[in-house]
Image (spheres, rainbow, N blue to C red):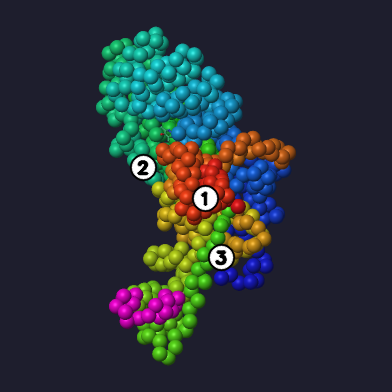
Amino acid sequence: MIKPEVLNRWTVENSEELYGIKNWSSGYFNINKKGEVTISPYSNNEKAQVSIMDVISGIKERGMDMPVLLRVENLLDSQISSINNAFNKAITELGYKGKFRGVYPIKVNQQQQVIEEVAKFGQRYHHGLEVGSKAELIAALSILKDKEACLICNGYKDEEFIDLGLNALKMGFQCFFVIEMPGELDLILRRAEIHEIEPNIGVRIKLSSKAGGHWTESGGDRSIFGLNTSQLIEVVDQLKKSDRLHVLKLLHYHLGSQIPNIRDIRSAVVEASRVYSELVKEGAKMGYLDLGGGLAVDYDGSKTNFQSSRNYTTDEYCSDIVEVVQSVMDESSIEHPTIITESGRSTVAYYSVLLFNVLDVAKFDTMSDAQAPKEDSHDLIKNLDEVLKTLSTKKIQECYNDALYYRDEVRELFRHGKISLRERSQAEAIFWKIMSNIVHCKSSLKQSPPELDEIESAISDIYYSNFSLFQSVPDSWAIDQLFPIMPIHRLKECPNRMGVIADITCDCDGKIDKFIDLHDVRTSLRLHELTTREDYYLGVFLVGAYQETLGDLHNLFGDTNVVSIRIHPDGGYDFVREIEGDTVADVLSYVEYDPRQMLTSFRETAEEAIREKRITVKERTEIVKAYSQGLSGYTYFEE
Ligand SMILES: *Cc1c(COP(=O)(O)O)cnc(C)c1O
């Protein structure tokens, strides 16, 4: 498809541009001279670069197979530093009198390793945790040690949840109960009285400010969470009546995740700051303004207000927030509150990369070896061939419509027995040749008709890959989220194929055919031809947020192997943790099989086959052994 002279001139820079790696990687991922993707966690240290291909060799030497979820601990640290430094810089520059306290919402990636690292590394900034359930609070209490960090309790709270939080408060933690429904207040006050301790109460409000993006409903009047203004006043009055207004210390809202537009963020902060100042005027003690999550990740690198991007930098996000809060407070001469944010996505997205090998490719051209019609060919075939010959940039739409019409006619006649299978096959080959030519003409058009966009993925090669979309990148399937995807080696070679990616579940939804682009969404990805020399590896990047535990056991593909590394400033790195993925027995037991009983039952079946003289005793031993090994093996394709 691409001219040979371009193949020879292809450089690492061409790959950088094609895959946009510099736009979305935040500097953490680069391409080295060998044409391999590297990880560089330190922004000012070029030496500390690790090639992902080296890591894959290390993984294989340790006896693990693809797919692997690779976690890079340093990237978590760098992101925590990044938001704290940006807020602290804004606070200093603007002369803001309050502090910043970040908290990490556990639900975004609950793995123990993540929470441990946040608590350990975050201690230098007093970075705390946000929990939304009892289980998350119990997890947080086993890990958090820093008494100056905040521990924010959102979600619906029963007596047990409240008691756990009150005990944390007693032990010196900055634990806040955020009220999501008016009814919760009573129970908290009652339990606090029994425990003889003053609770820290926060209120979650619904803002009228709306935000664009997938999660628009999380904020706004129609959100299912939080108090509306009359409920808020009810809570204030309830506290006033019992002379407890001093326990109300925090105001919280959460607009939703991945807010791409800074204007939405600003307008929400304005509204919340106004509510905060009114609560102070009502006599509440306050002191904390918790702006929730929403800090977006630029998955496509376009720096726009498109869903998978953001039109602001972290610095702009922080300085806008500080500036707005400051100016609203100053208007009413109110003391500057401690600003809390609950950034989850932007904290952990970079941390994980999904790596897998390609198993096979179904090439499009092998399907479209079109033969020219003969004298006695069917008229419809001749017509199609005519369309193929007359196709030009000016007539794209017309040719597309004609081709579709003739193709459908052919199918109709086939149904009635008027056209043979061989003729139909010839017609369809010409049809696909036309589609393929349309895609090539289309690229020279400024604006192409939308129905033509779909053709591109239809004429792409299919790269069958060793992973499950449903297990490892569920948001790609569930909400069409885009992630940067690219080969992690061979980047000095021109990727001269166009492909879509199919996973190994046998579900037709188990495919990726939407890819990032600076201006648009691409329907195919440029990839390399497979060789017999080596495996071909692809990486799905920025999958650290939300993907791991949302995944499911579609076709009984289980958790992948997980490998964590830590990169040192001198460029060395350690494998700090390996977690073997699920075995077949593991996933079967999740769906209530009993692997031991299964083996017993299979043995009996094999014994029966001996009785029926189908297999020998020796064969039975082999057969049972293979079954048993299958049970204890990896659920993915093994070499
Ligand atoms: C999910 C959630 C977050 C995390 O939002 P991100 O956009 O991932 O930063 C923060 N706060 C609350 C209350 C949430 O429900």
Pick the front one: 41 or 477: 477
Pick the front one: 95 or 371: 371
Residue 156 lies, with reference to residue 503, above or below; the image says above
Say whether residue 414 is visible. Answer: yes
Residue furthest bottom in the image: 375
Label 3 secondary element: strand
Pick the front one: 381 or 304: 381
Q: Which residue has dot 2 on it?
A: 216
Q: Earlier in the sequence, mark 3 or mark 1?
A: 1
Q: How many residues crowd mark 2 within 10 Å: few (<14), some (14–19), many (20+)?
A: some
Give x and y (percent) for residue 61.
68, 45
Q: How many residues crowd mark 1 within 10 Å: few (<14), some (14–19), many (20+)?
A: many
- Residue at 45% of width from left, 42% of height from top? 601
Amino acid type shown at disc 1: Phe
Label 1 secondary element: loop
Pick the front one: 65 or 112: 65
Label for residue 505?
none
Q: CA distance from mark 1 to mark 2?
A: 31 Å
Label 2 CB sits under 8 Å from any ligand 1 atom: no
